[in-house]
């Protein structure tokens, strides 16, 4: 049996549709049931929904063999997993945003509000810029408006939220999409059953 | 006094089983100091799993460290005095990868120093397979070879950081990321195609070796990998062996065969090893070296009964 961690929400539902299209569906997956585990014994797969930020942890810790996870979460957590496929869904970008009229003063430590402290730290470290990270859990766009931070490092999908709040993306850090990940140990033992699934997914993209 | 071995936990039982196994194979016990001068680790940071080393000031004012690694200490003490076969069972101190504080990790392992030829390599690989087998019946030993992967990366004429980025993408089996990176860096198309091929070449050793024979048959690395597999296969260990070129290591320290061992039910590799001649040379030794370590801390979470 291959255990697969899918992120709850729209991204996970889209990801599940890819598995279904590949011939690995599970009939009661999308009927709003309160079940936690969904098995298709004939195909040898078992799905479960997890918080999007947790999918890679389930895989890295061996509770799931495969998982679907955003590139943002993968980069932030830096876990030791295989990144087998770009599923091409949930496309957006990691960006630095600021108030439209913000002018960076290199003499000052830059205050950066973000949900992604590791990504922000690595990005500015590579540029030799001193920063002060303000770790927030949500509503990141509020930070520059209330002078809590100078800039934000966050996900930008269409840019509408930034525009509506008089903010603008200033630098693009990297492209994001959902990835199929696998546990390194699980992959050694379940290769024979995983490979046809991965191949079917690849062909469906 | 007789000791009832039922009082031992999984980790303690493994320590004794491995010690006996290594001793029966001619590997003598090596005891070392718990502390090393910090300088040893500062100069070889890339060899360590993490940069973070637990340090303190010794009575003479010298900066000392709680050992994060055993191999460096053994290689440092080796004086090119011929062939040495050593085994150890020591604690190492490393930061918790999930962001917590330092952890004390129990390691058992062996090092084979001196003239390391095919015979010694096969012996060490056989011993690593036996070590896994004595911990559980359901195990896999995965082999890679720096002599096959690294020359391809070297052909890309990249700087050290860029080479490390390529190695990371290969170790993640990230074919998409590799393509995007190659495009951004304008890497030669043929080299990228070869890297992609290596990245996707894994699994059954016979199939991998056959696929590789066409392009690599004349190479020493290929010959070594084939001989090691055949030697393991001849001992009925073949069904547990995989070949996977995404198994890389830092080329500044490793240049030959590299390997990892897994038990079904553990999320990470329990055993890790390789041929480390470049490390020997960095510590001014003329001889070669190969060895492996078993990370015993993981066994505490291993629910299954041990086979032995």
Image (cartoon, rainbow, N blue to C red):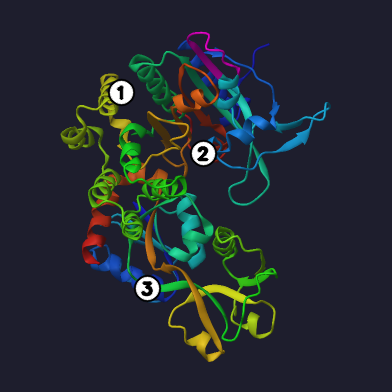
Q: Nearer the viewer, mark 2 or mark 1?
A: 1
Quarter of the image with the N terminus of chain B is top right
Q: CA distance from mark 3 to mark 1?
A: 46 Å
The magenta region covers B77-87
Q: Is residue A33 visible?
A: no
Q: Which residue is mark 1?
A: B228
Check disc 3 and report its element: helix, strand or loop: helix
**Cα distance in 3D space between marks 3 and 2:** 33 Å
In this picture, is A102 found above or below A43?
A: below
Subunit ID for the residue under disc 3: A
Residue B8, x across and y down, in percent: 61, 26
Disc 3 designates what residue?
Answer: A13
Res B302 label: 2
| Callouts 3 and 1 close, C-beta under 8 Å | no
Q: Find residue B128 and name its label.
A: none
| Residue B156 position (above or below residue B20) | below
**How many residues crowd around disc 1 within 10 Å: few (fewer than 14), some, or many (20 or more)?**
many
Look at the numbered disc 1 and give the secondary structure of its residue: helix
Along the line of sight, which residue is nearer the eye, B280 or B138?
B280
Marks 2/1 same chain: yes
């Amino acid at each position: 049996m291959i255990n697969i961690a899918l992120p709850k929400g729209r991204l996970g539902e889209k990801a599940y549709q890819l598995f279904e299209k590949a011939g690995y569906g599970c009939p009661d997956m999308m009927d709003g049931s309160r079940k936690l585990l969904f098995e298709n014994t004939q195909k040898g797969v078992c799905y479960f929904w997890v918080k999007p930020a947790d999918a890679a942890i389930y895989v890295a810790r061996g509770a799931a063999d495969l998982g679907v996870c955003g590139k943002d979460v993968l980069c932030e957590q830096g876990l030791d997993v295989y990144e087998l496929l770009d599923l091409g869904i949930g496309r957006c970008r990691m960006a630095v945003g600021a108030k439209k009229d913000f002018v960076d003063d290199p003499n000052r430590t830059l205050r950066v509000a973000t949900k992604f402290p590791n990504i922000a730290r690595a990005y500015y470290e590579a540029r030799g810029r001193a920063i002060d990270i303000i770790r927030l859990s949500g509503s990141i766009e509020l930070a520059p408006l209330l002078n809590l931070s100078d800039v934000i490092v966050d996900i930008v999908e269409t840019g509408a939220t930034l525009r509506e709040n008089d903010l603008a993306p200033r630098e693009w850090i990297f492209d994001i999409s959902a990835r199929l990940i696998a546990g390194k140990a699980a992959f050694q033992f379940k290769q024979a059953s995983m490979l046809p699934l991965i191949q079917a997914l690849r062909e469906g993209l | 006094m007789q000791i009832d071995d039922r009082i031992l936990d999984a980790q303690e039982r493994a320590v004794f089983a491995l010690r006996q196994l290594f001793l029966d194979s001619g590997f003598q016990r090596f005891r070392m100091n718990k502390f090393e001068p910090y300088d040893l680790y500062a100069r070889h940071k890339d060899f360590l799993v993490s940069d973070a080393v637990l340090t303190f000031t010794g009575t003479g004012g010298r900066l000392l460290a709680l050992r994060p690694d055993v191999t460096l200490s053994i290689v440092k003490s080796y004086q090119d005095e011929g062939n040495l076969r050593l085994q150890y069972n020591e604690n190492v101190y490393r930061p918790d990868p999930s962001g917590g504080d330092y952890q004390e990790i129990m390691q058992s392992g062996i090092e084979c120093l001196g003239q390391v030829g095919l015979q010694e390599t096969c012996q060490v690989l056989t011993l690593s397979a036996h070590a896994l087998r004595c911990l559980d019946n359901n195990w896999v030993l995965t082999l890679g070879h720096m002599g096959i992967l690294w020359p391809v990366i070297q052909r890309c004429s990249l700087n050290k950081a860029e080479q490390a980025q390529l190695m990371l993408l290969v170790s993640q089996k990230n074919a998409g990321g590799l393509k995007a990176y190659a495009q951004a860096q304008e890497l030669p198309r043929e080299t990228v195609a070869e890297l992609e091929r290596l990245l996707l070449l894994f699994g059954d050793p016979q199939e991998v070796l056959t696929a590789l024979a066409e392009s690599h048959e004349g190479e020493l690395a290929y010959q070594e990998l084939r001989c090691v597999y055949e030697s393991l296969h001849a001992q009925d260990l073949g069904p547990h062996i995989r070949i996977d070129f995404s198994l890389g290591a830092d080329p500044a320290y490793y240049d030959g065969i590299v390997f990892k061992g897994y038990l079904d039910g553990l999320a990470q590799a329990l055993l890790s090893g390789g041929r480390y001649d470049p490390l020997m040379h960095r510590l001014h030794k003329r001889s070669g070296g190969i060895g492996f370590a078993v990370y015993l801390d993981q066994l505490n979470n291993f629910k299954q009964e041990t086979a032995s």
